[in-house]
Amino acid sequence: MAEDKEKKPGRISRMFMVLYDVWQFIGRFFKEGFLPPYEGKELMRQCYDIGYRSLLLISLTGFITGVVFTKQSRPSLAEFGATSWLPSLVGIALLRTLAPLLTALIAAGKVGSSIGAELGSMRVTEQIDAMEVSATNPFKFLVSTRVLAATITIPILTFYTAMVGMLGALLNVYTNEETSWRAFFSSALESISFLDVTASTIKAVLFGFTIGMVGCYQGYNSSKGTEGVGKAANAAVVTGMFLVFVEEVITVQFFGLFRN
Amino acid sequence: MENRQNSTPAEKVVEIRDLHKSFGAYHVLRGVDLDLYRGENLVVLGKSGTGKSVLIKIIVGLLTADRGSVKVLGSEVDQISYKELLALRLKVGFSFQNSALYDSMTVRQNLEFPLVRNRRKLTRGEVAMQVERVLDAVGLLQTLDQMPSELSGGQRKRIGIARTLILQPEIMLYDEPTAGLDPITCLEINGLINEVQERFHTSSIVITHDLTCAKAVGDRVAMLLDGTFQRQGTFEEVFNTNDERVKTFYDYNFIQ
């Protein structure tokens, strides 16, 4: 029996085993996450935690992005005498790509690593086992709440980033073109379509789900003591960011089909 | 403390037959047979890495056996549904080696956690009362609003035991209850294990390599050697032998 277990699977087999494991993990979330009993209090706590943890960094990054993007775009538009298009250019760029991507990347770094490390540490100190043996469902309490919280909070943060970015752009436009804030926002909002808002929301939901799921998967399945915790946090960030970029490419192509 | 050998109890609450468990090439448990009778404290002795903790993790369904049968309160652990396993776990308390307290929660929240999720009809007042009752039983009522990081090793062990007691289990599984504690605190924990048995009428398996603990709490002792229980009986019966492995184990614990 022991000899049978000695046989180690090859790299490709291992890859498929991990994919199957991930598939089961996601399946378990959909199977258990929406069934009672609900962990409402923990969900609210996680939503607050994720939002609060990322707010300062997102505010700063969003604002700076708005200022810098506007400043960098001006010379190109000025060549054609089209600086009046700046608000709509910045508005579209922020809503369609910059805000969802920036928010997701910051969340992957801040939230993903934190979830990975927290659950990883709970795994290696047997806190998850302790929940299991006390006849509670640690998956529901730890994983479902965190994935749902990330899926709910990151879209909200995305629109917040877009707003703050617009304020940064307004500051730059106002100081250079002396455009009023009313004219700036009216021009920016006019160019934003319903499809832009929908696409951005769907993207942000997808990013939030991915970041939450990757962080939880890495942490929940971590092993090998403190080294495992570090690896889980690191893998949560790296895998989360990579998947966000992959999803960005796919969603841009997909929503491109609906644009003229 | 004197060994407390009672009259032989009859009802088996845990029944293990021909249990095998391997990790890779390492065959840890090689056909273990063990019975735990209602109301007794059974001490499982053995060196580190002999599979003592693996054994109780299999009993509670945290690990699955490769072969063999584990019957707990009449249910075959690896043949029941997840729902039935959860119901069974309500009757089996597990005290972890490192206490495994939820470090983001206060002591009160640690104790409330299993209770509010398993006894949903309890009012807030009843929950508070139960929490205070078990904390009082382990003598740490004053730590109610402290964080686990603010507690000493011995206090953490006690809170860990209190958290398992709050569900009023029939069986208690203690994984190295005195590991890493000073001798005085060890004596206190040994006393607590005996008190739990008397006050809550539990049957217990105590995993340890500490012979002082074994002698103080064990109604019966089973020694795990080379993956099987080769010696079982009272403390004196187990150690009254010429088996070098047992003698060495005894000598290293400096028991006179």
Image (spheres, rainbow, N blue to C red):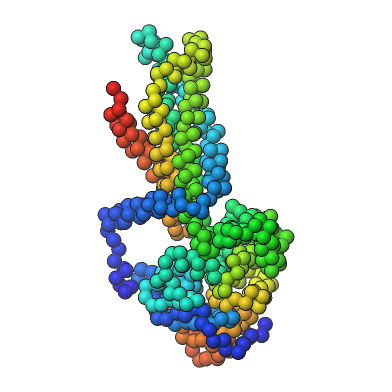
Q: Position of residue B112 (x, y in %)?
A: 62, 58
Q: Position of residue A73 (x, y in %)?
A: 40, 17
Seen at 42% across and 51% down, the residue is A29
Q: Position of residue B63 (x, y in %)?
A: 43, 68
Seen at 39% across and 35% down, the residue is A202
Image quarter of the C terminus of chain A? top left
Residue that extends furthest to the front in the rendered view of this protein = B121
Q: Position of residue B139 (x, y in %)?
A: 71, 67
Classify residue A93 by image quadrant: top left
Seen at 40% across and 71% down, the residue is B79
Is residue A217 something one can see in this rendering?
no
Q: Nearer the viewer, residue A21 or A245?
A: A21
Classify residue B70 by image quadrant: bottom left
Q: Nearer the viewer, residue A133 or A248?
A: A133
Please determine whether, in this image, residue A240 is positioned above or below residue B66.
Answer: above
Q: With B180 as the anchor, is A242 left or right in this view?
A: left
Seen at 57% across and 86% down, the residue is B9
Please determine whether, in this image, residue A8 is positioned above or below residue A210.
Answer: below
Is residue B236 something one can see in this rendering?
yes
Image quarter of the N terminus of chain A? bottom left
Q: Nearer the viewer, residue A146 or B66?
A: A146
Residue that extends furthest to the top in the rendered view of this protein = A81
Q: With A234 as the anchor, is B90 left or right in this view?
A: right
Q: With B138 as the anchor, is A110 left or right in this view?
A: left
